[in-house]
Image (tube, rainbow, N blue to C red):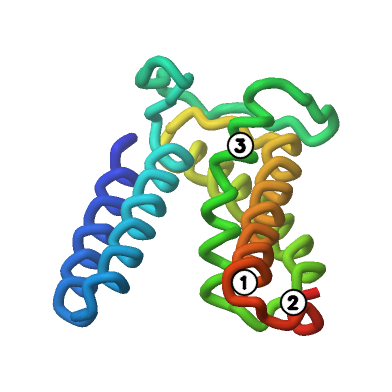
């Protein structure tokens, strides 16, 4: 039962891959879509399964309901890792919704971080995946998503020379 979230993630990823192969014919668009799918699958595996990645090792967390931290924000290596983990997500959100301004990415990032941590909390209680719901992760995820959106902004400004007004 602990591995149910992983099975759901892998099944959805497989179905998404089949859909992409059958419906996207242009090579470059297909590559970008498949890389995005691989990233989202990897992200879901990291966030919603009992597998934990320390940067140098992968290990299975013991069964449990995890913990909750709503008060203390820690700025450590895990904080930086969470930012790095969600920068591509911010990039994907900004590319998918190009009309969203950079200022609007701040609440989108914080809401996305809140949804991720809330899902971890409920999945920890339903499937005993032993994930910690942490306010530091919400803030770090929000920062990563805003940085990813800013990178799309910089890309469009530098490489495509688009007007700045619609992006800010």
- N-term mark: 2 or 3: 3
Mark 3 Cα shell of 10 Å, populated few (<14), some (14-19), many (≥20): some
- N-term mark: 1 or 2: 1
Q: Secondary structure at mark 1?
A: helix
Q: Which residue is mark 2?
A: 167
Give the Cα separation between the discs numbered 1 and 2. Answer: 9 Å
Task: Establish if 140 lies above or below 158.
Answer: above
Rendered residue at 73%/65% (across/down): 105
In this rendering, position of residue 98 left or right of residue 18:
right
Residue 38 locus on image (x, y percent):
32, 52
Task: Establish if 18 lies above or below 76.
Answer: below
Callout 1 touching callout 2 (CB < 8 Å): yes
Q: Quadrant of the N terminus?
A: top left
- N-term mark: 3 or 1: 3
Q: Which residue is mark 3?
A: 82
Quarter residue 6 falls in: top left
Rendered residue at 33%/35% (across/down): 2
Q: Quadrant of the C terminus?
A: bottom right
Residue 162 locus on image (x, y percent):
67, 81
Rendered residue at 51%/38% (across/down): 125
Q: Which residue is mark 1?
A: 156
Quarter residue 93 falls in: bottom right
Residue 13 locus on image (x, y percent):
27, 58
User: Which of labels 3 and 1 is toward the front?
Assistant: 1
Give the Cα separation between the discs numbered 2 and 3. Answer: 25 Å
Residue in front for this viewpoint, 12 or 98: 98
Residue in front for this viewpoint, 133 or 109: 109
Mark 1 Cα shell of 10 Å, populated few (<14), some (14-19), many (≥20): some
Q: Which mark is residue 127?
A: none
In this rendering, position of residue 113 left or right of residue 128:
right
Callout 3 touching callout 1 (CB < 8 Å): no
User: Which of labels 1 and 2 is toward the front?
Assistant: 1
């Amino acid at each position: 039962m602990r591995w149910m979230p992983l099975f759901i993630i892998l099944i959805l990823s497989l179905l998404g891959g089949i859909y992409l192969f059958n419906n996207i014919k242009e090579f470059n668009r297909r590559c970008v879509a498949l890389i995005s799918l691989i990233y989202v699958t990897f992200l879901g595996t990291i966030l919603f399964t009992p597998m934990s990645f320390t940067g140098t090792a992968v290990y299975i967390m013991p069964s449990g309901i995890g913990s909750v931290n709503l008060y203390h924000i820690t700025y450590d290596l895990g904080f930086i890792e969470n930012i790095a983990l969600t920068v591509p997500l911010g990039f994907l959100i900004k590319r998918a919704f190009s009309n969203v301004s950079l200022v609007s990415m701040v609440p989108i990032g914080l809401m996305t971080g809140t949804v991720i941590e809330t899902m971890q909390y409920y999945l920890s209680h339903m499937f005993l995946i032993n994930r910690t719901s942490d306010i530091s992760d919400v803030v770090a995820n929000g920062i990563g998503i805003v940085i990813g959106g800013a990178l799309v902004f910089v890309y469009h400004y530098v490489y495509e020379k688009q007007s700045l007004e619609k992006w800010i």
